Amino acid sequence: MCDDESAEKALVSVDFEIFGHVQGVCFRMYTEKEGLRLGLVGWVKNTYSGTVVGQVQGPAPMVDEMKVWLSKEGSPSCRISRASFTNQRAIEKLELSGFRTRF
């Protein structure tokens, strides 16, 4: 397997927190849809401080695409001021299944 192929198959996990006007604008629902569209697993939830947090796992290129979506796009009526990505790490296999909204 050449390096390009192993990079595509490498699985990663990353935590995120999205700041701005991201609650009450269907941000979680759109995050779930986008995660599933990209073939990722993970979860998303609102925080009491008005941010949205979660975790995504999957192939590195898809996770990178999700990070761009989370920091630049989001739901149609949201206004993202900042996106924070932490604890990115390589994983052997997916630790989650499906993509869910947590409460």
Image (cartoon, grey):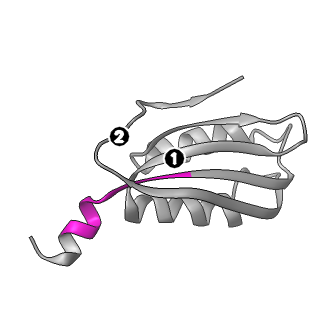
The segment highlighted magenta reads 6-14
Q: Which residue is mark 1?
A: 56
Q: Amino acid at mark 1?
A: Val
Cα–Cα span, label 1 and label 2? 10 Å
Figure quadrant of residue 61: bottom left
Please report the residue visible at 65 percent of the width from the left and 52 percent of the height from the top.
16
Please report the residue visible at 69 percent of the width from the left and 38 percent of the height from the top.
28
Q: Amino acid at mark 2?
A: Leu
Q: Quadrant of the N terminus?
A: bottom left
Closer to us: 47 or 28:
47
Which SS class for mark 2?
loop
102 versus 54 height, above or below: above
Closer to us: 41 or 39:
41
Mark identifier at residue 35 = none
Q: Earlier in the sequence, mark 1 or mark 2?
A: 1
Q: Which residue is mark 2?
A: 94
Which SS class for mark 1?
strand
Please report the residue visible at 44 percent of the width from the left and 31 percent of the height from the top.
98
Q: Residue furthest left?
A: 1
Mark 2 nearby-residue class (10 Å; few <14, some 14–19, many ≥20): some
